[in-house]
Amino acid sequence: QVQLVQSGGGLVQAGGSLRLSCAASGSFSRVIAMGWYRQAPGNEREWVARITDSGTTTHADSVKGRFTISRDNAKNTVYLQMNSLKPEDTAVYYCLAVQPPYTFWGQGTQVTVSS
């Protein structure tokens, strides 16, 4: 079992920045990847970024160049730095941890970008 606790988020004007954090605890040793998804009202959950246990990162085209996923292994924490935010980035953001055959989710964090 992996527990994920998210922090960060909130309200920001377009062009601003926010950083989300996702702290993991529990049986963390077999987690092969962590990442972020988001879900806007009326939309399906959308993948945002991923970081593997080897440190390889990938980002969705919609956020590439603006968002950066990173991690602090000493703190078992993954971050999502979000810059140049746009109103269309408004969503509830969820972190996840993949520990085959399971996927664990954080509680979700609201990000609202005003125009």
Image (cartoon, rainbow, N blue to C red):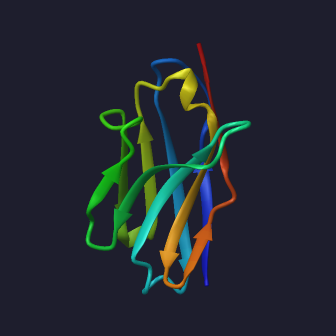
108 to 76, vertically: above or below? above
60 to 88, vertically: above or below? below
For the point 52% across and 47% down, which residue is it? 20
Number of numbered tags placed on the structure image: 0
Which of 115 and 76 lies nearest the eye of the viewer?
Answer: 115
**Most distant residue in the right direction:** 42
Residue 107: percent from the left, percent from the top?
Answer: 69, 59
Residue 108: percent from the left, percent from the top?
Answer: 67, 52
Residue 33: percent from the left, percent from the top?
Answer: 41, 70
20 to 2, vertically: above or below? above
Q: Quadrant of residue 104?
A: bottom right
Residue 63: percent from the left, percent from the top?
Answer: 40, 36
Determine whether, in the image, residue 67 is placed left or right of residue 86: left
For the point 49% across and 84% down, which residue is it? 100
Determine whether, in the image, residue 115 is placed left or right of residue 99: right
**Most distant residue in the top direction:** 115
47 to 89, vertically: above or below? below
Pick the quarter of the image with the C terminus: top right
For the point 61% across and 49% down, which residue is it? 45
Which of 38 and 9 lies nearest the eye of the viewer?
Answer: 38
For the point 61% across and 85% down, which residue is it? 1
Determine whether, in the image, residue 109 is placed left or right of residue 83: right
